[in-house]
Amino acid sequence: MKKNDNNKLIDNTAEDEFNLEKMEKETEEMLKLRFLTKENSVFARTEGGFVSLKIGDEFYKRVLVYRVFPFTNPEGYISIREPDEKAKEIGIIKDLRNDVTKETREMLEEQMRLRYFTPVIEKIIDIKDEYGFAYFDVVTDHGPCRFTIHMGGSSVVYLSDTRLMITDLDGNRFEIPDITHLSAHELRKLDLFL
């Protein structure tokens, strides 16, 4: 029940049911899984270096590319999403090697290299701990780098028994593929996080 302009109570049950139906339909649409293949979709590079997508009558002038399982299955289950803040999923590419053309695969892999850029830490020069922050001075496969992380929380995460992922204050990711390859001196510096 709600009031109309004359302050009289009116029955809005039908309106509530309509909204419920609309919500159920939207939920059903969100839960639908659409697989994208070379037969039903066309990806193209835009002038700005982004990727567009055409599926039947639908056209997306820009799409985002995400790995559903970035560490365990980087070539499988690639999520294609709208570029707004909700990042609504448009569809899934089940197997990047077989379900799209070579040109499309190269285009999507380029987008994912940008999204998942993760320098590998090859040498730890120093780590300083001050006031709840850790200041890293390292050498990566892309050259020397300095970054800062929060001491608490999930800045350093084990991906396996020996593989670490480190996320700095700006959200940049760094990887140590195997901590057993670090020197004893480097391990002592990293000991705060192990």
Image (cartoon, grey):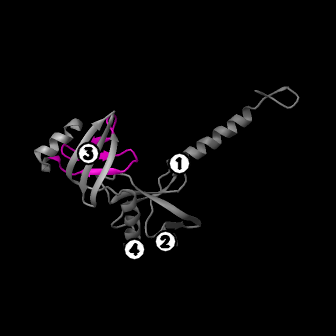
Residue type, label 4: Glu
> Residue shown at 38%/66% (left/top)?
110
Of label 3 and label 4, which has the lower sequence position? Answer: 4
Camera-side mark, 1 or 3: 3
Residue type, label 2: Ala
Give the alpha-carbon distance from disc 2 to disc 4, as whole Å: 9 Å
Of label 3 and label 2, which has the lower sequence position? Answer: 2
Of label 1 and label 3, which has the lower sequence position? Answer: 1
> Horizontally, is 48 left or right of 163 in the view?
right
- Residue 21 lies, with reference to residue 144, above or below; the image says above
> Horizontally, is 150 left or right of 189 in the view?
right
Which quarter of the picture shows residue 57? Answer: bottom right
Residue type, label 1: Met
Give the alpha-carbon distance from disc 1 to disc 3, as whole Å: 30 Å
User: In the image, which disc is placed on residue 103?
Assistant: 4
Residues shaded magenta: 150-179
- Residue 193 lies, with reference to residue 30, above or below; the image says above
> Residue shown at 30%/43% (left/top)?
135
User: In the image, which disc is placed on residue 30?
Assistant: 1
Residue furthest to the left = 184
Q: Position of residue 184 (x, y in %)?
A: 11, 44
Q: Nearer the viewer, residue 173 or 71?
A: 173
Q: Position of residue 128 (x, y in %)?
A: 26, 40
- Residue 57 lies, with reference to residue 18, above or below; the image says below
Residue annotated with mark 2: 44
Give the alpha-carbon distance from disc 1 to disc 4, as whole Å: 29 Å
Residue annotated with mark 3: 159
Q: Nearer the viewer, residue 92 or 194?
A: 194
User: In terms of secondary structure, where does tag 2 sit?
Assistant: strand
User: In terms of secondary structure, where does tag 3 sit?
Assistant: loop
> Residue shown at 61%/41% (left/top)?
23
Give the alpha-carbon distance from disc 3 to disc 4, as whole Å: 31 Å
